[in-house]
Amino acid sequence: MKAIFGTFAIFVTAQAILAGFGIGEGFLIHLAIPAVDLNVAIFVGVAAAITMAHFMVQVLNAVASRRLDEDASENREDDEAPPTFYVPVPPMHRQRPRRKKK
């Protein structure tokens, strides 16, 4: 039960932080460009904050996986080749010769 509550608390905190950044960005957009309605500016700010968080997570995952790949390659012996997997190609069906018209 504690694990579920902890996960839920982290999720709610992350959502609150994203919403806070989005509302702040939206308010600044509205102040910079008064022609933009506050609701639209907040929506754009929240969308920008979510997109930024998404790309940041993707970059951090890529960096972490690259480090893991480098560590794995350092641990491998030099003379041992990585395993090679061959995928069998399905046989191609030959076309039957067409019958000539009489």
Image: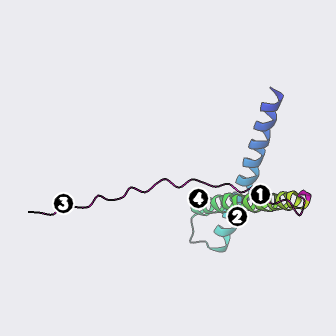
- The one nearer the camera, 55 or 93, is 93
Q: Which residue is mark 1?
A: 61
Compared across the picture, whether 4 is left or right of 97 comes to: right
Indicate which label's residue lies in the foreground, 1 or 4: 1
Q: Position of residue 19 (x, y in %)?
A: 70, 53
Dots 2, 1 in contact, CB < 8 A:
no
Nearer to me, 23 or 60: 60
Q: Amino acid at mark 4?
A: Asn
- Could you say where residue 69 lies in the image, as x and y percent from the top left? 82, 59
Q: Residues within 10 Å of mark 1 (few under 14, many from 20)?
A: few
Question: Disc 1 vs disc 4: Cβ atoms closer than 8 Å?
Answer: no
Which residue is label 2 attached to?
Answer: 25
Q: Secondary structure at mark 2?
A: helix
**Is 101 rendered above or below residue 7?**
below
Distance from disc 3 to disc 2, alpha carbons, whole Å, reads 73 Å
Name which of mark 2 and mark 4 comes first in the sequence: 2
* Mark closer to the chain start, 3 or 4: 4
Q: What residue is drawn where x is 18% and y is 60%? A: 99
Q: Amino acid at mark 1?
A: Asn
Viewer-side label of 2, 4? 2
Q: Position of residue 29 (x, y in %)?
A: 66, 69
- Prevailing secondary structure of the magenta residues: loop
The tag on residue 99 is 3
Q: Nearer the viewer, mark 1 or mark 3?
A: 3
Q: CA distance from mark 1 to mark 3?
A: 60 Å
